[in-house]
Image (cartoon, rainbow, N blue to C red):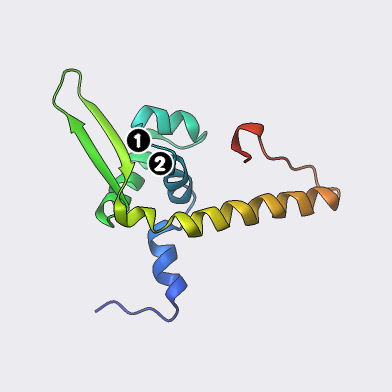
Amino acid sequence: MKQYNLGIEATLEIIGGKWKSLIICLLMAGRKRTSELQRSIPGVSQKVLIQQLRELEKDGIVGRHVYNQMPPKVEYYITEYGITANEIIDLMCTWGRSNIKKRQQQGEDVRLLESESK
């Protein structure tokens, strides 16, 4: 039996880490192929991306659709259950934007790329 001291532990187990929240955020905008996700997440290797996608799939957050064609085509999407994480991901994005503004006001050289801002 798995036990948690706090509910946030269960949340972080699923969406924590360097890449999973980014993957979820990108997929909230619509279905994406592995190559599209990799281009949108600088620094992630294909191996790690696929590993993270598989973990999110196992946890029911992400689904995968394999098209019966050559060459093979695979698209990832947010499941109905995964959509329930949208609120927390949006809150994380909002908090992150506010944090960047605060740090800029304190003189730190930090910026949010235009393509990421809402």
Q: Image quadrant of residue 37?
A: top left
The correct choice, above or below, for 8 with respect to 98 in the image is: below
Residue closest to the eye, 24 or 2: 24
Say what amino acid the circle numbered 1 marks: Arg
Q: Amino acid at mark 2?
A: Leu
Give coordinates of residue 100: x percent, y percent.
72, 49
Which of the two residues, 62 or 9, is positioned nearer the viewer here? Answer: 62
The quadrant of the picture occupied by the C terminus is top right
Q: Secondary structure at mark 1?
A: loop
Q: Residue at x 52, y 33 (%)?
A: 42
Q: Quadrant of the N terminus?
A: bottom left
Please name the residue that numbered disc 2 is placed on.
27
Left/right placement of residue 71 relative to residue 90 reads left
Above or below, 111 relative to 13: above
x then y, percent, for residue 18: 49, 50
Give the residue at x 37% y 34%: 46
Residue 13 is labelled as none
**Percent position of residue 23, x then y:** 43, 44
Is 17 on the left or on the right of 72, as rendered? Answer: right
Q: Residues within 10 Å of mark 2 (few under 14, many from 20)?
A: many
Q: Residue at x 47, y 45 (%)?
A: 25
Q: Which residue is mark 1?
A: 31
| Residue 103 image offset from top left, x and y in percent | 78, 52
Q: Are marks 1 and 2 in contact (CB under 8 Å)?
A: yes
Q: Dividing the picture into quarters, in which one does residue 65 lie? A: top left
Q: Nearer the viewer, residue 84 or 114?
A: 84
Q: CA distance from mark 1 to mark 2?
A: 6 Å
**For the residue carrying disc 1, how many other residues have a C-alpha within 10 Å: few (<14), some (14-19), or many (20+)?**
some
76 up-or-down from 97: above or below: above
Q: Secondary structure at mark 2?
A: helix
